[in-house]
Image (cartoon, helix red, strand yellow):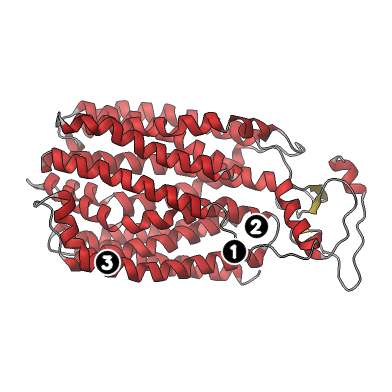
Amino acid sequence: MSCNQARTQKPTARTGTSQTDGRRPQTLALRGFNRPNGPRIMFLNGRGRGSGVQTMSTHAAATIDAVEAGGTPRRLELSGAGLLSAAMAGAGLLAYAFHILAARTLTTSDYGQVAALWAALFIGVVVLFRPLEQTTARAVADRLTRGEEAATVLRSIAIVYVSVLVALGVAAAFAWGTLTDRLFLGSDFLTAMLVAGIAGYGLQYVARGILGGLRWFRGLSGIHLGDGAIRLLVALPLLTFASKDVAAAALAAAGIGGAVVPLWQGRAQIAALRKGADDEKFQLREALRFAGPASVIAGSDQLLVNGAPLLVIGAGGGDASKAAAVVFAATMLVRVPVFLFSGVAGSILPNLTRLNASADHRRFATTVVRVCLVFAAATVAIVAAAALFGPEGMRLLYGADYTAPASDLALLGIGAGCYLACATMSQALLALARGLQAAAAWTVSAALFVGVYAVVQGADLRRISLAIAVAMVVNTVLLAGVFARRTRSF
């Protein structure tokens, strides 16, 4: 049945039910309507999609079948979370193996340069390309749920990706000398690896968005594991040839290398995105409208997650690189448990987008609240583990030069646990197209992080740990308030 034919159908209400008033999208079965024979259809509001009836996706239709058969959908929508969590745990182990290898084979000063490259690389990548990942994942999941084609999403994202690469090349040419002298102490090779790594990871992040939107979490897990495996393999020569250039090359190679195999394996699913209703094509302006707030969130996120070594190096001092190495090692150590739970955050945007598109608001809110409660309990465990085992873990994994007080590691644990809840609530607000409010909360948090670090006196690690803890607690409170106000109308 075509969309035009579908619009002529007049579904009748079952006894004891009322028809939808069109104020929000409603699936027929969930609202008590009889469905005519043929393709599944759903009522949509005027939220940029027009009014009337459109073809429903196979996945959404399957949900209706379960309801009509007397079954109930799962209370929480966390499809792929377990698989992604396992993949992220493996990727985390590979990342830590890389850092331990680099820290053990390089001098503290050289490892500080590798830490600076890592921080600059992922700040640049996440700020420039995570918004594209999230835009792609949300748009693809939304359009597939509504039975629409998604090939126009990929075309729009490709235009943005190429434009960002051109801008990156121009900016790198102008800032090359400053980056080389101030960040990498005169190493042109590290600057080149920074630019190459950002470009490669940009492609990987777009691939993540495509596979996430398809909800093909096995392929998405392959990207994460491939990334970590390639980085460690390229870094293995450090065992015989201790050079920061080898570590830098490993960081750059992991970007594009991790995405190649999953993209090839998923080529059939990606090609199928051309199928579906094409009455309303995805427009480039839609991508830019969503990506704007997402860019602000990503920038603030990465300042808090990876910006600590850059702040220490930026403050100067004769031992800035060594201090940055210790700070980076401590923040990485405390983030070990985060990898176990980050699969939930990685799968939640496409899952919540699908629930929002099918107006399953109760499951939407329940999923977010339950996940955040789990993360609250995880925060307590992270803080306790960091305080009890963190100091010895630093010396054991990184060497005798890497020491950290238990109190500082506990503060970093608070920040790490709160980050999990903040990431979850941010994905929920993005799924609800409330990115501006989320961006405002993250901006306040990032500014608070820099402000606390500037005001507090003492050792660099103490200043960083306190600043991260304060900023993330405030961010959690702000995002929880925004989410509560938005979901009160559900």
Residue 355 is marked as 2
Of the image marks 1 and 2, the number of the one nearer the N terminus: 1
Q: Position of residue 136 (x, y in %)?
A: 56, 41
Say left or right for 448 vs 439.
left
Q: CA distance from mark 3 to mark 2?
A: 36 Å
Q: CA distance from mark 3 to mark 1?
A: 29 Å
Residue 151 found in image quarter: top right
Dot 1 alpha-carbon crowd within 10 angstroms: few under 14, some 14 to 19, many 20 or more:
some
Q: Position of residue 353 (x, y in %)?
A: 61, 53
Residue 76 is marked as 1
Q: Quadrant of the C terminus?
A: bottom right
Q: Which residue is mark 3?
A: 385
Residue 315 in view in this figure: no
Say left or right for 25 vs 186.
right
Answer yes or no: do the residues labelled 3 and 1 have beta carbons within 8 Å?
no
Residue 244 is marked as none
Dot 3 alpha-carbon crowd within 10 angstroms: few under 14, some 14 to 19, many 20 or more:
some
Q: Secondary structure at mark 2?
A: helix
User: What residue sits 60% from the left and 68% below the top?
Assistant: 487
Q: Position of residue 284 (x, y in %)?
A: 60, 36
Of the image marks 3 and 1, the number of the one nearer the N terminus: 1
The residue lying toward the viewer, choosing from 337 and 281, is: 337
Q: Secondary structure at mark 3?
A: helix
Of the image marks 3 and 2, the number of the one nearer the N terminus: 2
Q: CA distance from mark 1 to mark 2?
A: 10 Å
Dot 2 alpha-carbon crowd within 10 angstroms: few under 14, some 14 to 19, many 20 or more:
many
The residue lying toward the viewer, choosing from 427 and 29, is: 29
User: What residue sits 61% from the left and 63% below the top?
Assistant: 364
